[in-house]
Amino acid sequence: MKKQTQSDSEMHSEGKKTYRISSSNGANYVYGHYKARNTQISEDREGKVEDLSDNPLVTYGNDNEKYGVAAFIKKTKTVPEYILADQDRDRFVVKDWLKLGDKADAIIDISATPDGLVNKTSILEIKCPDMGNSCFDKDGKDNTFGVPKNGFPIQYLCQLAMQQAVMNMMVDADGGHIYKIQRSYLLGWSPNRTRIWEYKYNQEFIDWICKQLEEYSLCLIDGEKVKPKPDDYKDIVVAEYENIKLKWDSAGENT
């Protein structure tokens, strides 16, 4: 997925400012992983754009995403929808997701840009983290959560959950739900090794994620500071991490 570095802001047709929070920044919104929550919220209010065009990690991921998609297709014999050039950051957007309407001076939209969809029930997310090295050959444990560095990259868990939440909010013209997401597949790709994990939808965790996103959204509108970290967030995220299953490893594990 092409990384989005800030929530977009624009003027609504009725003169209200509209912000968009995107799943790629989910970990920042929820507990401040890459940036403190209040740093992120200040940048969102200002519409500040972080230029990542020269970031070698981002460039590597964008250039090699196609190989991750190919690996998924080869292993699952399934071609996902909305992959690579068919991705559109404006396709999966829930307008005024808190349904504040006239009760607020601004509007918050929420969006997701998964790397693919399978049968309207599964999401594909491709990562080439740390030049393809992270989640394969790293020693030690994650500095925040204390989980092994050579497993599922826990920093993406909130992004996956936020994607699931957004997709299940999408409705058609008659108000019917378009998707019923039941799982996400995260594929970690490197030139020498590929892994696929399955993360099943968990309503309890989704509710917790949405609670943090609602808190963040309301503070973004009101100009207030947001709580720096949710209570017990480490325990909650690690407990959910334990539900993730390694489905395939090109090195021969779980084949």
Image: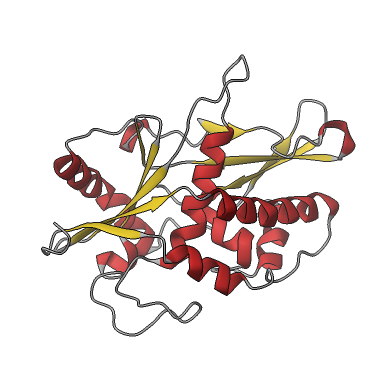
* Figure coloring: secondary structure
Q: Quadrant of residue 94?
A: top right
Q: Quadrant of residue 255?
A: bottom left
* Percent coordinates x, y for residue 190 in the rendering: 21, 61
Whether 160 is drawn above or below 54: the answer is above
Return the residue found at the far top. Answer: 174
Relative depth, front residue between 86 and 79: 79
Whether 76 is drawn above or below 152: the answer is above
* Percent coordinates x, y for residue 11 in the rendering: 75, 35
For the point 69% across and 54% down, which residue is it? Answer: 211
Whether 169 is drawn above or below 188: the answer is above
Return the residue found at the far left. Answer: 252
Lateral position of residue 30 relative to residue 184, left or right:
right
Lateral position of residue 173 relative to residue 144, left or right:
right
Q: Quadrant of residue 246?
A: bottom left
For the point 37% across and 42% down, which residue is it? Answer: 115
Q: How many marks?
A: 0
For the point 40% across and 63% down, which residue is it? Answer: 55
* Percent coordinates x, y for residue 1 in the rendering: 39, 47
For the point 67% across and 66% down, which residue is it? Answer: 37
Residue 119 visible somewhere in the drawing: yes
Residue 5 visible somewhere in the drawing: no
Lateral position of residue 46 relative to residue 53, left or right:
right
* Percent coordinates x, y for residue 132 in the rendering: 26, 64
Relative depth, front residue between 49 and 209: 209
Whether 206 is drawn above or below 79: the answer is below
Return the residue found at the far bottom. Answer: 140
